[in-house]
Each structure stands twice: as structure tokens, then as C-alpha cells.
Image (cartoon, grey):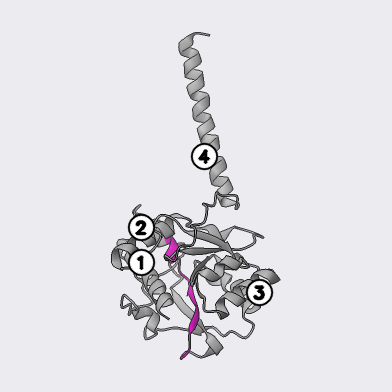
Amino acid sequence: MTRVRWWSLRRLLGTVGLIIGSATMLQSQRFGRMYIEPNVPYDGRFTFVRLRYLEYGPAGWQFDYPAMERNLMTIVKDLTTMRLHQRGSNVHLMDDPSLSRYPIAYLSEPGYWYPEDREAAGLRAWLRKGGFLIVDDFYFRQWEPFAQAMRKVLPEATFIRLDASQGLFDSFFRVTDLGKMHHPDNASATAEYYGIFEDNDPSKRLMVIVNYNNDVGDYMEWSGQGWYPVNMSNDAYKIATNWLVYGLTH
């Protein structure tokens, strides 16, 4: 075999290897074996926290990770005077004791979340100590599995549908039309927002914001790629910024 032919074969094998490697990486991400970046050491600055749940189906907790949080933190850094980690974020199990250091946490794809007792107990303790939970990225038939999971965490909780008069929608940006957005995978799934309040009393602390029939995280993840209309991405950033400002000031 000539040197030229041998070099061509090596290049071909290298290309095939890259293709196989890329396919393996994508498959690993799809089935929950993705690489999780090291958590940012606690130093008092705001850190975006994503909750990880035990996987009995699609590993939906990881969807949009970590691009969504990087994009959101970049926007929030430019908009506010908040001291934050822009290029790093955390992933915590719900019963991780260190979760108590962080006031806000994000939960993605809760339609595939089936909490074990220790997960439910950990999240319950965090919420009752003052944690603010953001739930995102699910629609239609995924509601009931999520509702059952949430009842295991807070058995007494009632879901209260929110309208634009709720302070959450005016904590930084004023959002008046809550029906403008929809889930990116289904245009007929018009966004709805539900809250769980302390003692089920809307005059008390909002503990959980449920972003149903929507996927704000997906809009933010792909905001620079031209996949979605600019107005949808802009609205997603407004809503998410309100989440953070509200959670830190209430």
C-alpha cells in the first residue's frame, strides 16, 4: 500500500471514528449518561441550580443543559447588578444537604419525575425553609404525573392558576399577556402558569412557580441559533429574569 493510500485510509478511519464518537455522545446525552460539569464552589454569588432526579425514563431534568443557564446568566448579568456565576452552574439531587445554600432551583421535564421518599423529603425540607422552585418544560398529558409527584413532596399543596396581576410578572419586566407563549413542540399548548403558596394562601410566600404548556428553557437555549421567533426568545428571557428577581426578593 502506498504512503498516499495509507494516509487516505487513516483520514477515512479518523472521520468514521469522529462520526461514531459524535453519535455515541448524542446517544449518551439522550439516555442520561451525559457529562455533568463540576459544581461551582459556594462563595455567596448567585448560582443557577438545576435539580436532578432519579431516572426511570427519559432524563428530562438535563434538557437544555448547560446552554440555557449560560445564556440566561449572560442576560441577567447585563440587565442587573446581581453578583453571579456567569460561566458555571450547579446540578443537585433533591436530597443533597448543600442545596440549602441556594435560594432558587430549576426543575425541567417534571412529567418524567417519579420521586423516591428521600427525594421528596429533601425537596420538601428545602421548600419549607424558604426555597423557590421553578418548574418548566412540560405539557398536556405530562401534568398528572407531575401533580402526583408534587403531592408526594407537599401533600397539602393546591395549584392556583396565576394571572398577570401576580407580582411575579412585574418583578423586573412587566408581562401583561400570559397567553403569548406556547410550548415549542406543540403550538396548540398555550402557556399557563400555576403557583403553590405557603399554606395555600396567595397572600403568603410563593414557593413554586409552574410553567405549564411551555418551555422557557428551550427558547433560551436556542436563542442565538435562529430556531425560534425572536419575540418568543425575548419573552422567555423576560419571564426567566422575573423568576430570579422575584425569588431573590421574596
**Part of the protein shown in magenta:** 203-218
- Could you tell which of marks 3 and 2 lies nearer the N-terminus? 3
Q: Earlier in the sequence, mark 4 or mark 2?
A: 4
The residues bearing labels 3 and 1 have C-alpha atoms spaced at a distance of 31 Å
Residue at position x 57%, y 70% in the image: 142
Question: Of circles 4 and 3, which is in front?
Answer: 3
Q: What residue type is labelled 4?
A: Ser
Q: Residue furthest front?
A: 43
Coordinates of residue 201 in the picture (x, y in percent): 51, 91
Q: Residues within 10 Å of mark 3 (few under 14, many from 20)?
A: some
Query: Quick one: SS at disc 1?
Result: helix
Taking the magenta stretch, the answer to whether it contains residue 64 is no
In the picture of the structure, the residue carrying the numbered disc 2 is 223
Q: Which residue is pictured at 51% across the width and 19% down the height?
A: 9
Circle 2: element type: loop
The residue to which callout 1 is attached is 237
Measured Cα–Cα span from mark 4 to mark 2: 23 Å
Mark 1 or mark 2, which is nearer to you? Answer: 1
Q: Position of residue 118 (x, y in %)?
A: 68, 70
132 versus 199 height, above or below: above
Q: Give amino acid for label 3.
A: Ala
Q: Report which residue position mark 4 lands on.
A: 22
Pair 3/2: label in front:
3
Residue 162 disc label? none
Cα–Cα span, label 1 and label 2? 9 Å
Around disc 2, counting alpha carbons within 10 Å, would you say few (fewer than 14), some (14 to 19), or many (20 or more)? many
Q: What residue does disc 3 label?
A: 121
Label 3 SS: helix
Percent across and percent down for residue 101 are 52, 69
Q: Which of the 4 image quadrants contains residue 58? A: bottom right
**Quick one: label 4 or label 1, which is nearer the N terminus?**
4
Q: What residue type is labelled 1?
A: Tyr
